[in-house]
Image (cartoon, rainbow, N blue to C red):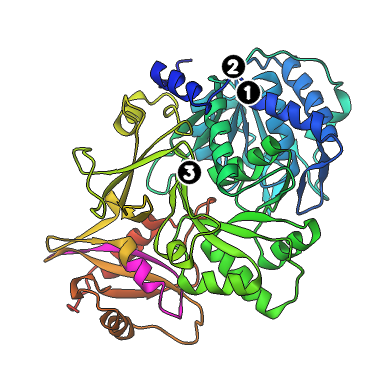
């Protein structure tokens, strides 16, 4: 099949000369870690399923033998719709051993979405849980054999009390013996395809080579001083770019220990940190907030924890201080599936940098801000954020036109995010280009309003969307989750707060919707399209009053 990979020869030459790309594959790095850290714990999950590097390598060799037996060849796709379980890493390594392309799928996606992804990838094998979050996966996916012509096997991963009569991972590991395999894959070959979250439309398959992933995680490790001595906690889904790259891949590249949590609960997270002596991790900002609050109520030994990295939403001022009081640092980072977190705060950055910026470029990565003609703008001027580097993806799977819209011939990826950059290279993300509310000809950034509202002491989470208006075109509506639900927050109080913050009046939210929780996808990103549809229904026939 034609994948549509876009790699320029100058990129290969340039990144190799600078040492960012090389000849080693992800499998080579895995083999090195097995050799150097055979008895060390490679991965452990919330259910305490634990593998040393040697044990995981042996199990992966058995699974690789199964892949060969059923005809999986180098370059074939193997899909995994699994939570944050140790078995995910096992299957990932087995894929590397036979040269298969890894395709993680978020567990919350259902039949239609999974069918779309599997057909796009022409997947040969699909791994699913026997049961997760009360969902009986195999019953839901029995029809997939008819819908996916390429699919040879569906393998069930059992956990805890689950018992399944069909083909399971455990049966494969019991039946097959490890065999030596030489897959002949190269560092510039495709290693993984991760699908975008699809918060606004059809997911796109982001293609990443071995060199893409290796260079990304080397920069990540260098930025945060990560070594083989670290124990890396990952409560984010392993099918998401953050979990896949920074939770699973970075760990085995370094020879470190990966700690996975399949369902985030703050109490369980703190217990994992205490049990496994985790030194760092990645969490959504709202989850860090939950952890910090729990440390005030319950005593856990988290002295091993150095920092949490937050992405996807701003880090509130109070959270930085409260985390510091709890004994660890909180830092922001920014990126996407196409250009995995490529800017970040630094460990020694002052609090104000962490609060007011989304960091600066990681080693080997360039960042610029451009206008609508893709011309670079001066420092402090808002434009579209673009990044270039050895980490940037090599195209959307079988979508060359979509690829060419965002990835130019010079290797720049145009994110669609609005941003400003200071003279020191630190950036501030101000929202999506398509997430601008146009109110009577005035452009309003949803993110700017959200950042202001997050400074209110009773606002835990917020999402601002445009709502249709006959006269002005759009007005802003803020959906808010409260810290203290009993203390209500109305429009009058919000307007007074914005006035005290000296915000221009046209930027005031014109409607407040208090909700119990935000609609989110499996990557913990807020699904604003749901909120937009919700407000359209609510305002139908209503007359809104100007602020």
In the picture of the structure, the residue carrying the numbered disc 1 is 25
In the image, taking residue 285 as reference, residue 419 lies left or right, namely left
In the picture of the structure, the residue carrying the numbered disc 2 is 186
| Towards the viewer: 216 or 161 | 216
Secondary structure of the residue carrying tag 2 is loop
| Towards the viewer: 450 or 384 | 384
Q: Is residue 351 above or below residue 109?
A: below
The residues colored magenta run: 449-470
| Towards the viewer: 40 or 189 | 40
Query: Residue 62: which numbered mark, if any?
Result: none
Residue beneath the point at 65% across and 19% down: 99
| Towards the viewer: 178 or 200 | 178
In the picture of the structure, the residue carrying the numbered disc 3 is 362
Q: Please tell me in which quadrant of the rendered image residue 182 appears.
A: top right
- Split into 4 quadrants, where in the image is the C terminus? bottom left
Instruction: Give percent across and percent down for residue 327.
Output: 66, 69
């Amino acid at each position: 099949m034609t994948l549509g990979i876009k790699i320029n020869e100058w990129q290969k030459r340039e990144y190799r000369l600078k040492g960012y790309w090389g000849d080693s594959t992800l499998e080579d790095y895995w083999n090195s870690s097995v050799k150097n850290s055979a008895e060390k714990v490679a991965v452990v999950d919330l259910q305490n399923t634990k593998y040393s590097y040697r044990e995981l390598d042996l199990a992966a060799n058995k699974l690789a033998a199964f892949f060969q037996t059923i005809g999986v060849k180098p370059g074939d796709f193997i899909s995994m719709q699994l939570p944050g379980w140790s078995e995910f890493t096992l299957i990932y390594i087995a894929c590397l051993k036979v040269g298969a392309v890894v395709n993680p799928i978020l567990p919350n996606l259902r039949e239609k979405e999974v069918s779309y992804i599997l057909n796009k990838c022409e997947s040969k094998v699909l791994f699913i849980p026997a049961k997760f979050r009360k969902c009986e996966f195999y019953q839901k996916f029995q029809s997939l054999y008819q819908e996916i012509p390429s699919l040879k096997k569906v393998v069930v991963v059992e956990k805890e009390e689950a018992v399944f009569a069909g083909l399971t991972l455990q049966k494969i590991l019991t039946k097959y013996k490890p065999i030596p395999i030489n897959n002949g894959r190269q560092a510039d070959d495709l290693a993984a395809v991760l699908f975008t979250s699809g918060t606004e439309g059809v997911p796109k398959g982001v293609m990443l080579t071995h060199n893409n992933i290796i260079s990304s995680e080397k920069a990540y490790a260098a930025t945060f001083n990560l070594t083989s001595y670290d124990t890396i906690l990952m409560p984010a889904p392993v099918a998401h770019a953050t979990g896949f790259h920074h939770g699973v891949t970075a760990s085995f590249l370094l020879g470190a220990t990966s700690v996975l949590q399949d369902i985030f609960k703050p109490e369980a997270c703190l217990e994992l940190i205490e049990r496994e002596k985790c030194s760092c991790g990645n969490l959504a900002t709202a989850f860090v907030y939950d952890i910090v609050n729990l440390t005030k109520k319950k005593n856990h030994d988290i002295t091993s924890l150095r920092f949490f990295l937050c992405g996807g939403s701003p880090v509130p001022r109070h959270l930085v201080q409260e985390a510091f009081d709890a004994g660890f640092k909180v830092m922001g980072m920014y990126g996407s599936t196409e250009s995995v977190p490529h800017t970040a705060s630094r460990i020694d950055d002052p609090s104000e940098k962490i609060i007011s910026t989304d960091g600066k470029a990681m080693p080997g990565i360039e960042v610029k801000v451009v206008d609508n003609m893709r011309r670079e703008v001066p420092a402090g001027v808002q434009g579209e954020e673009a990044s270039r580097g050895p980490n940037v993806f090599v195209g959307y799977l079988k979508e060359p036109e979509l690829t060419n819209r965002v990835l130019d011939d010079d290797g720049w990826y145009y994110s669609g995010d609005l941003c400003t950059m200071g003279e020191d290279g630190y950036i501030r993300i101000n929202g999506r280009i398509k997430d601008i509310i146009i109110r009577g000809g005035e452009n309003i950034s949803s993110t700017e309003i959200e950042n202001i509202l997050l400074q209110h002491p009773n606002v835990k989470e917020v999402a601002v969307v445009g709502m249709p208006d006959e006269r002005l075109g759009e007005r802003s509506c803020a959906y808010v989750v409260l810290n203290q639900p009993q203390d209500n927050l109305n429009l009058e109080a919000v307007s007074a707060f914005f006035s005290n913050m000296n915000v221009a009046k046209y930027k005031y939210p014109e409607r407040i919707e208090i909700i119990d929780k935000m609609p989110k996808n499996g990557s913990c990103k807020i699904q604003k399209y749901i909120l937009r549809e919700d407000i359209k229904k609510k305002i139908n026939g209503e007359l809104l009053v100007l602020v």
